[in-house]
Image: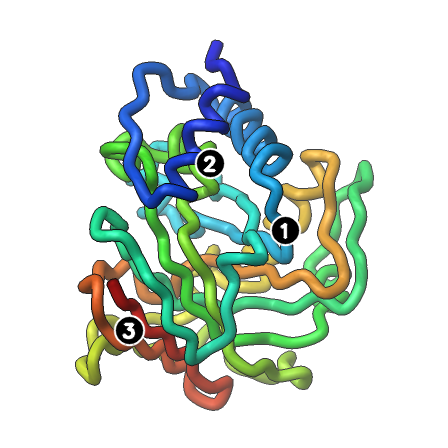
Amino acid sequence: MTDRNALADSLIEARRAGSIVTLADTPSSLDESYAVLDAVMERYGEKIVGWKAAFTNDAAMEKMKTPEPAMGPLFETWVFRSGATIATPDNCARLIESEYAFLMARDLPARDSTYSEDEVADAVASLHPAIEIAHSRVDGGFGIGASVLIADHCANFAFAYGDGLTDWRDFDLLGQQVTFSVDGEEIATGTGEAVMGNPVASLTWLVNKRSSRGGGVSAGQILTTGTCTGMQPVARSCSMVADFGPLGQCRLDCTD
């Protein structure tokens, strides 16, 4: 069995140093992967200000060799507002995802029964346009798949979000085209249907995954639901815009 604390420490150090590690021993199951992630959260010393869902469609789950989506933390130091400039190391994968994110208005604590979509939606304060920079600090991590990526901060490098919409229930989450552009050039488009068929379904899955693991989500946390436009690699120095139509845009610059 993986030494979860030793692996967590090596992943934390790689994140702090901007380095890549080669693992001789990797988690052999998703339970082991989440055990390592739990150790990362315990030992990293960073405040968790939100949660992310990953691999939120069938193609992504197949590629990442997992029967279900994945869940991971968003750490305060690596959460930004739209318009920020983020330095990335040369070895960063810089896989960019355009995502719908939800700011929570009240706690949804762990409980024995699952939360319904209506219960989760009722706990939402606002809907936001967002960008996640995905990265693995493990050599070949995206090729290995979910067993490593979940342990490795659930493949999160950084996250940014724009201004929100409080009256969001009438917004067309499924049909609204999302456009991702880099340095003024359109790179990819998609819709919320790519996110478990509906971003609210992904949000509900994320809340229930947190609950099933004995946690929960808290008022003031931001929950991001998975990419509408796939994972798009970008250069080390670039300007990015994720445009969600009437919801607004999330802008982010990468620099070396």
Classify residue 62 as left or right of residue 99.
left
- Residue 237, image x and y in percent? 21, 68
Q: Earlier in the sequence, mark 2 or mark 1?
A: 2
Q: Earlier in the sequence, mark 1 or mark 3?
A: 1
> Disc 2 versus disc 1: distance between alpha carbons?
14 Å
Q: Residues within 10 Å of mark 2 (few under 14, many from 20)?
A: many
Q: Earlier in the sequence, mark 2 or mark 3?
A: 2
Q: Which residue is mark 3?
A: 189
Of residue 66 and residue 146, the one placed in the foreground of this image is 146
Question: Looking at the image, do the residues carrying marks 2 and 1 touch, with CB atoms under 8 Å apart?
Answer: no
Q: Residue at x 50, y 85 (%)?
A: 247
Q: Which of the 4 image quadrants contains residue 43?
A: top right
Classify residue 217 as left or right of residue 86.
right
Residue 166 to residue 151: above or below: below
Quarter of the rendering occupied by the C terminus: bottom left
Residue 34 to residue 104: above or below: above
Q: Considering the numbered disc 3 on the image, is that residue within a helix, a strand or a loop?
A: strand
Q: Considering the numbered disc 1 on the image, is that residue within a helix, a strand or a loop?
A: strand
Specify the farthest residue to the top.
1
Q: Which residue is mark 2?
A: 12
Of residue 5 and residue 128, the one placed in the foreground of this image is 5
Q: Which of the 4 image quadrants contains residue 5?
A: top right
- Residue 230, image x and y in percent? 30, 60
Q: Considering the numbered disc 2 on the image, is that residue within a helix, a strand or a loop?
A: helix
The three-letter code of the residue at mark 2 reads Ile
* Residue 66 appears in the picture as rendered: no
Choose mark 2 or mark 3, whichever is in front: 2
The three-letter code of the residue at mark 3 reads Thr
Q: Which mark is residue 48?
A: 1
Q: Which mark is residue 59?
A: none
